[in-house]
Image: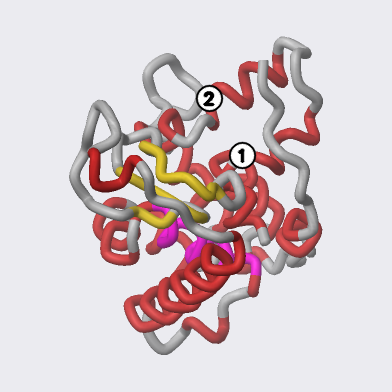
């Protein structure tokens, strides 16, 4: 599953995520308090892969249910690819956070403007596009800028777009086409879902 890949797979020992939250398993946040160093109460915490997978499956199903409820009655009319992107985003930023922080994304998906929705992930101002300083904070935080930069420099291959949450979700939405223009839906999400390779390290 793509979300599990983006979370880096199972981590048996507690660690601080990129924002400083104590985390364990497959992106399971232990406390919504940021730290510079691991608090003592979590330093010796250990979680088996079986327990981690169970918690992940519960969390993912909960996020999917929450997103469906917040999205409303037209959820079942969405392509599974779009549902998958929204659920993954909710896993990353929280269900309420998704709807509060990405209203343009939700609006574009509701209207079938999937290329516009993709741009909502990447840009602060979608009308400006690729200009300096216009990439969103979220895009930078999840490594979208780094991934695109490493691909552009030739350090990474183009296939690594599928390994990053930002670039992968962007490509999935872009690949759907705009339903308002009667463009076909493809199966990019399902193809990405099968990818298990890890993001390369320097």
Q: In the picture shown, does residue 77 fall above or below 165?
A: below
27 part of magenta stretch: no
Q: Which residue is mark 1?
A: 164
Circle nearer the N terminus (1, 2): 2
Q: Residue at x 36, y 37 (%)?
A: 16
136 and 174: which one is in front?
136
Q: Which residue is mark 2?
A: 145
Place of residue 106 in the rendered image (x, y in percent of width and height, measured from the top left) = 39, 62
The magenta segment is 81-92
For the residue labelled by badge 1, is the local secondary structure a helix, a strand or a loop? Answer: loop
Quick one: quadrant of the N terminus? bottom right
Q: CA distance from mark 1 to mark 2?
A: 10 Å
Place of residue 113 in the rendered image (x, y in percent of width and height, measured from the top left) = 53, 59
Place of residue 135 in the rendered image (x, y in percent of width and height, measured from the top left) = 42, 28
Q: Residue furthest bottom?
A: 73
For the residue labelled by badge 2, is the local secondary structure a helix, a strand or a loop? Answer: helix
Q: Main secondary structure of the magenta part?
A: helix
* Closer mark to the observer between disc 1 and disc 2: 1
Snapshot quadrant of residue 184:
bottom right
């Amino acid at each position: 599953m793509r979300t599990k890949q983006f979370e880096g797979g199972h981590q048996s020992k507690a660690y601080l995520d990129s924002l400083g939250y104590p985390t364990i398993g497959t992106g399971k946040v232990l406390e919504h308090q940021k730290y510079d160093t691991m608090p003592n109460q979590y330093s010796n915490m250990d979680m088996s892969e079986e327990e981690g997978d169970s918690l992940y499956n519960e969390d993912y199903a909960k996020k999917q249910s929450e997103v469906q409820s917040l999205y409303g009655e037209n959820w079942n009319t969405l392509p599974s690819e779009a549902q998958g992107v929204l659920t993954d985003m909710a896993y990353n930023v929280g269900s309420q956070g998704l709807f509060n922080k990405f209203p343009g994304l939700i609006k574009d998906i509701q209207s079938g403007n999937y290329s516009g929705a993709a741009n909502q992930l990447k840009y602060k101002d979608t009308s400006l596009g690729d200009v300096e300083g216009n990439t969103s904070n979220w895009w930078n935080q999840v490594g979208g800028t780094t991934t695109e930069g490493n691909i552009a420099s030739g350090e990474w291959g183009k296939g690594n777009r599928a390994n990053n949450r930002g670039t992968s979700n962007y490509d999935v939405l872009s690949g759907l086409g705009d339903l308002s223009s009667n463009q076909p839906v493809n199966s990019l999400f399902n193809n990405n879902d099968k990818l298990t390779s890890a993001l390369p390290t320097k």
